Image (cartoon, helix red, strand yellow):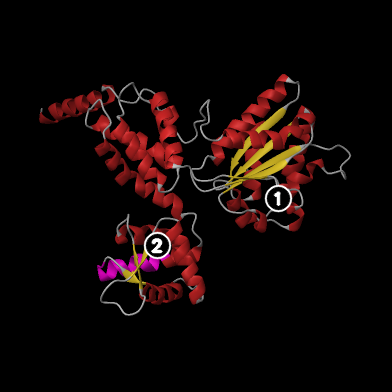
Amino acid sequence: MKDMILQVSMGNIIEDELMSSSVIKDLKPLDFDYVPEELLHREEQLRFLAQMFKPMLSRITQNAIIRGPVGTGKTVIAKKFCNSIKNLARKQGYIIEYVHINCRKRSKDAMALLGILNHFDSRFPDRGFSVQEMLEVLRKQLKKREAHLLVVLDEVDALVKKSKSDLIYNLTRFSDESYKEKVPISLLLISQKDIIPMLDSSSISTFKRSNVLLLDKYTREELYNIVRQRIDLAFHNNIVNDDSIDLIADIASEWGDARFAIELLWKAGIAADHQHLQIVTPEHVRAAKAETFSVITETKLKNLERHQLITLYSIAKRLKKDGTAYVSTGEAEKTYAITCEEYNEKPRTHTMFWNYLKEIESAGFITIKLSGKGHLGTTQLISLPDIPAEVASDKVKDLLD
């Protein structure tokens, strides 16, 4: 009898929560993959891409690169532009096939090619074909459709690191004069890092250095406008107060990251729902930051090089062991050398170690300040301002292992 009462009680709790009202009317505008009708503060960048890829409408291939930090709109700009040119071409009787590949998920040539071929044939087998055979299948598909292929290779540095730039070279050669029938393929590469030095000379020759779109971080005012736009699209009227919008813009402006701002907004709305409140307050935003920061941290950690990770791990490990707020650069470097031995890595020079410190400081993981009283000379002290040392060391250790 008690079990039956408990089951009914649990069922009521679940039903009450599922059927309760939400401050959010539409979750789609809070999704990272959402492309709004109006792309705020990126009008000039869209114009730049349109000017650059205009030859495509005359069946001439074009290649370009979009580069910028996390959350600056690289992917959403690419999707907005590519869908627009595809639709315009169809109105003119010209077929442009657009395929978007995430190279962090498909970091080998064969995996990326499979993603492209799946656009034309969802049943194409995922094994049994060499890269060259897959390229030939792609050529036949495009010839059959008389189509111009526009491929976006997002986070392309992940592909180049693992497979070099062979696929990029092969795709740009589809329209080479050496083939009897040219098949037009245009490429748009997206990366946080400068991809040009990572390409071989043959691939570089197909990318003009002027064909690079550089994106800056969003300003505080721009982030405010983006958050306001997503509120109008996603929330019921008069739900998010002005103080909450200001706080989200202030927090996200430290990184200039629109993704972070949108995630803060979404999590703040969820926090209000949990309390069954019909208003999103600054306290909900603060709760969202506490929860979201760990997700943002993990994303940014994956962008660090191995020795940057070892440096950060050494700092977190030392702070955790000593139980102090700060560790000196000298102590951190000693711990770094020991950690390198643990991971069978050769410690880099003092100058390189200092570069690693500045890079992970720029990424927002640590702060470095001059010591005060009680320290000799100009000792510099390192702290982890936004994440507990134990959490940081565990997360970085997982990546290193």
- Circle 1 Cα neighbour tier, 10 Å, few/some/many (<14 / 14–19 / ≥20): few
Q: Alpha carbon of mark 2 to alpha carbon of mark 1: how far?
A: 38 Å
> Residue 309 colored magenta?
no
Residue at (60%, 52%) from the top-left corner?
157
User: x, y (%) of residue 104?
Assistant: 55, 48
Compare residues 180 and 244 and report the one nearer the observer: 244
Amino acid on which the number 1 mark rests in the picture? Arg
Amino acid on which the number 2 mark rests in the picture? Lys
Residue at (39%, 65%) from the top-left corner?
313
Q: Tell me which corner region of the image, top left, top right, bottom left or bottom right, holds residue 162.
A: bottom right
Q: Tell me which corner region of the image, top left, top right, bottom left or bottom right, holds residue 200.
A: bottom right
What residue is shown with label 2? 397
Q: Is residue 126 above or below residue 88?
A: below
Q: Is residue 122 visible?
A: no
Give the side of residue 292 with respect to residue 352, left or right: left
Quarter of the figure that contains the N terminus: top left
> Which segment is the magenta one?
312-324
Q: Tell me which corner region of the image, top left, top right, bottom left or bottom right, holds residue 52.
A: top right
